[in-house]
Amino acid sequence: MTDTRRCPNPKVVVTRELADTLMDRMEALFDTRNNRADAKLTRAELAAAMADCDVLVPTVTDDIDAELIAGAGDRLKLIANYGAGVNHIDLKAARARGIIVTNTPGVLTEDTADMTMALILSVPRRLAEGEKLVRSGQWKGWSPGGMLGHRIGGKALGIVGMGRIGQAVALRARAFGLTIHYHNRQRLPAVREAQLAATFHDSLDAMLAAVDIVTIHTPLNPDSRNLIDARRIALMRPHVYLINAARGGIVDEAALVEALEAGRLAGAGLDVWAHEPAIDPRLLALPNVVMLPHMGSATLEGRMASGERVIQNIRMWADGHRPPDQVLDGWI
């Protein structure tokens, strides 16, 4: 579909520093203001940018809420998000103002799945604890009872959200001998289930009570916020490990801490946090939690691919076409 309302040289504001080649390319293609200092924009700076640009390129660290969107200038018609998740953008408010929102789906799938698999291995095998022991200089050498963990082969993996990333994790997990269980809004086609050797659970509660490791791969939106709350954590057996490389707000962090401290969960692998970059100090004190700084998608290849998708979306919109990655709702 072609729109006659073209914008041949849009004014673009990018809120965070991208790779030099991406920033140079955007400056060559558009009237672009890059944030080469990579200092997070204040709310006032973000509001000023949105009042005087055609395209905003935010990241997950920018909270584009209804108030900011309401105060945006009439020329702002595209929010081209750098990343797949859009829970930091008020989609309803954007639609009400006639602002198109795009994202960059798919390009970070393999990177995030790799990191998830690393966490699935790291927590039961106590890799982070072992690394700290060696660095501390207190390791006394091998012993039959030293640093005993648990094997993952033969265990049941429960995947919450079986989209692109969930399926990529399932493929990796099968190679390590895990059996695959999943809960999703919609059941996968039978052919895909067979390819993944995956068992569908229409009840999330029932799946959580039946598996040994839980990994989360659903977007954060009003329906999924605190999806894994105190009640659902209590359904998991004490030997279960919880992995979250999706969004921190999906897990009730306080309830998770309480369960870990009480020994009602065996451990956790976390790459995302409820109040990033702040982390509950109680989690920092727990040896059975592997903690990462939201780096699941942090590869040079992935970052470059995300930037190219942003550029593609802007160019299509500027030429009067519907951008290929337009977000139509909060589930991606």
Image (tube, rainbow, N blue to C red):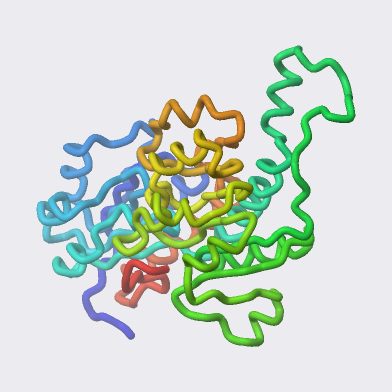
Quadrant in which the C terminus appears = bottom left
Q: Position of residue 91 (x, y in %)?
A: 25, 64
Along the viewing direction, whichever of 19 and 297 lies nearer the viewer: 297
Along the viewing direction, whichever of 156 and 276 lies nearer the viewer: 156
Which residue is painted at 22% across and 42% down in the image? 46
Left or right of 202: which side holds 171? right
Which residue is painted at 37% across and 49% down in the image? 249
Which residue is painted at 35% across and 69% down in the image? 327
* Residue 7 visible in this rendered orientation of the protein: yes
Q: Position of residue 48 (x, y in %)?
A: 16, 43
Which residue is painted at 50% across and 27% down in the image? 284
Along the viewing direction, whichever of 116 and 184 lies nearer the viewer: 184
Quadrant in which the N terminus appears = bottom left
Along the viewing direction, whichever of 88 and 282 lies nearer the viewer: 282
Above or below residue 98? Residue 135 is above
Q: Position of residue 280 (x, y in %)?
A: 41, 31
* Residue 27 visible in this rendered orientation of the protein: no
Farthest top residue in view: 137
Left or right of 26: which side holds 140? right
User: Total label count?
Assistant: 0
Above or below residue 327? Residue 238 is above
Q: Position of residue 242 (x, y in %)?
A: 56, 49
